[in-house]
Image (cartoon, coloured by chain):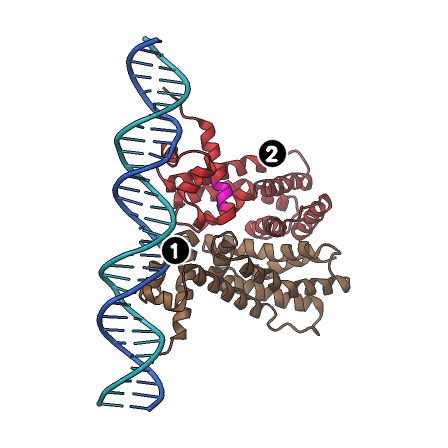
Chain colours: A red, B brown, C cyan, D blue
Amino acid sequence: MKPKDEKKIRQIFSATLKLVHENGLAGITMGEIAKAARIATGTLYIYFKNKNDLINALFTDCRKNAVNIYFKNYHESDPFKKGLKVIWLNLLKFRIEHFEQAVFVDQCHHSPFITETTKEITRKMIQPLYKLVERGKEEGLLKDLDNTLLLTFMVGGINEFIKYSKYSSKKITGPQIEQMFLLCWDALKR
Amino acid sequence: MKPKDEKKIRQIFSATLKLVHENGLAGITMGEIAKAARIATGTLYIYFKNKNDLINALFTDCRKNAVNIYFKNYHESDPFKKGLKVIWLNLLKFRIEHFEQAVFVDQCHHSPFITETTKEITRKMIQPLYKLVERGKEEGLLKDLDNTLLLTFMVGGINEFIKYSKYSSKKITGPQIEQMFLLCWDALKR
DNA sequence: TCATTGACTGAATAAATATTCATTTAAATT
DNA sequence: AATTTAAATGAATATTTATTCAGTCAATGA
């Protein structure tokens, strides 16, 4: 028998991400996805029960990718500020390199495709970041405010800047990255 | 003859915003919009040539609403920090009260509906904010960095925090607002 | 009051899109 | 090499959705 080609799933996923980035969730059809993935429309239905399933599977996949990367190279033993910067850079890098995923995930949050259970994944994902901020407060290095407040400021600045840089197709430079972290740190530090 | 009912346009707009907030751009149909606006499907086509036109008109309307509000109560003669806070509060308040518009506009940026010319509106809209930041730098109060960098950090924190608060349906409190501005100011100030 | 005009309706039609399925193809097993 | 099994195809079908239109209604001006 012929086995399923696991590579096809990657093809389908990246075709979908590309199309959603260009046209949004509102602008994708199964036909176009298949074409972009260089397979027949019917083949999509071998790998996914239907459009809904495909989108939900891709959403879950994106979230997994993201969470795997956040804590890369972070060691509890590092001094707090250094550790924070490692994670902050991971967040930044991931968002720059996988902007398509960010666009897709954002759109999914208001869409008829994603189920409430799938959304739940996102909430679980950010738990470790809460711990990080908690540590910073315990060490007296961060402002003693809502974790959410601190985290959203940390993430919001990154997200917004990358959005603008992508829309105006300007590359982000090394010095800009340093400056961004400075802004972030000045905001959060006690 | 019977005149067009201008109130209907508002009905159509707010029905569309409501539906997009719930189901995203991918989840709206002309039929549902009509139903939510309590009119017949055909009537939509009296006010708008087609779906595309409706969406573009709504987009333009949203942008106008936003820009009208940003500089409310701001006087050049106010000291910089006070003026900044006025505008910052306007941004915040608008985003909280018209979150549906924010979701809609965001989704439109990656959609097959919105034309490049319509998007141009957004770019023009933020020009006055650049001037504001420029003033802060001239007065030596803000960090001497990219305007875009400063602005995106100012806006990004707001947007992200509101997003989280809406998704978890937690009301934003007065003290939180003060704390948010503190974070923002600490980030931007020299 | 009546005639005219254009808004308004919603069922009918057209167009777009998701999904199925008969057939073909390719890998694995005997 | 022959047989089996499931993947792969893409045209056909089903479904959903945008758009039209013939008929009705309501405001206006003569």
Q: In which quarter of the image is the N terminus of chain B?
A: bottom left
C-alpha distance separating marks 2 and 1: 40 Å
The numbered disc on residue B52 is none
Query: What residue is shown at x 65% (from left), y 63% (from top)?
Result: B127
Q: Is residue A77 magenta?
A: no
Quick check: can you spot residue A144?
no
Packing grade of label 2 (10 A; few <14, some 14-19, many >=20) is few
- Amino acid at dot 2: Lys
Q: To which chain does the residue with label 1 belong?
A: B
Q: Residue A123 vs residue D22: left or right?
A: right
Quarter the C terminus of chain B occupies: bottom right
- Please tell me in which quadrant of the rendered image residue B146 appears: bottom right
Q: Main secondary structure of the magenta part?
A: helix
Mark 1 crowd level (few <14, some 14–19, many ≥20, 10 Å Cα): some
Q: Which amino acid does label 1 sit on?
A: Ile
Q: Numbered disc 2: what chain?
A: A
Residue A130 against residue C6 in the figure, above or below:
above
In the structure shown, which secondary structural element does the residue marked by tag 1 occupy? loop
Position above or below: C5 against A47? below
Q: Position of residue A107 (x, y in %)?
A: 47, 49
Q: Which residue is denoted by mark 2 in the rendering?
A: A72
In-image side of A58 versus A86 (left or right): left
Image spot of residue A88 (x, y percent): 63, 42
What secondary structure is marked by label 2? loop
Point out the stretch of residues depicted in magenta: A16-20
Eyeballing the image, is A77 above or below B117? above
* Spot occupied by residue B189 in the image (x, y as percentages of width and height): 72, 58
* Front position in the image: B99 or B120: B120
